[in-house]
Image (tube, grey):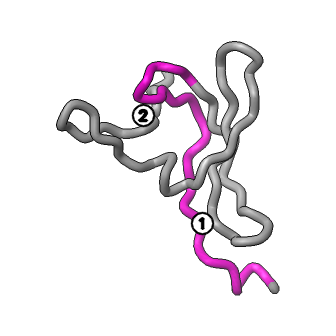
């Protein structure tokens, strides 16, 4: 398979994000799942042990419903 055969990536721009529950994370980039080719967002917690995580890119950029209103799961923090 060459790159022309791959489905398009859902890019998550690198930078700092705040989870709707309050934690802050640094997005390192967008990667692909080796078996499904699904776009995944690679990110690091900016607290505790600063672990690395992946989440489907569509879910990372998706909405959650909180008390009857929709919010971004992760909101980009504007850098000064």
Classify 19 as above or below 12: above
Q: Nearer the viewer, residue 38 or 14?
A: 38
Determine whether, in the image, residue 49 is placed left or right of residue 58.
right
In this view, the residue farthest toward the front is: 67
Span colored in magenta? 2-24
Image position, residue 23 (x, y; %): 53, 20
Which class describes the residues within 10 Å of circle 1: few (<14), some (14-19), or many (20+)?
A: some
- Give the overall secondary structure of the magenta segment: loop
The residue at the point 71 percent across, 56 percent down is 31
The residue at the point 70 percent across, 86 percent down is 5
Real-space CA distance between mark 2 and mark 1, rounded to the nearest whole angstrom: 19 Å
Q: How many numbered markers are drawn?
A: 2
The residue at the point 64 percent across, 66 percent down is 38
Based on the picture, tell me whether residue 21 belongs to the magenta stretch. Answer: yes
Classify 8 as above or below 51: below
Numbered circle sitting on residue 76: none
Q: Quadrant of residue 16?
A: top right
Q: Secondary structure at mark 1?
A: loop
Q: Nearer the viewer, residue 64 or 32?
A: 64
The residue at the point 63 percent across, 49 percent down is 41
Q: Nearer the viewer, residue 67 or 26?
A: 67
Image position, residue 40 (x, y; %): 64, 55
Among the two numbered marks 2 and 1 on one chain, the one whose residue lies closer to the N terminus: 1
Numbered circle sitting on residue 9: 1
Which class describes the residues within 10 Å of circle 2: few (<14), some (14-19), or many (20+)?
A: some
Classify 47 as above or below 11: above
Numbered circle sitting on residue 75: 2
Based on the picture, tell me whether residue 33 belongs to the magenta stretch. Answer: no
């Amino acid at each position: 398979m060459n790159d022309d055969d791959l489905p398009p990536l859902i890019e998550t721009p690198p930078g700092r994000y705040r989870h709707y529950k309050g934690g802050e994370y640094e997005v390192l980039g967008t990667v692909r799942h080796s078996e499904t080719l699904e776009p995944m967002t690679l990110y690091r917690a900016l607290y505790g042990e600063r672990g690395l995580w992946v989440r489907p890119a569509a879910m990372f950029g998706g909405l959650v419903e909180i008390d009857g209103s929709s919010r971004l799961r992760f909101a980009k923090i504007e850098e000064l």
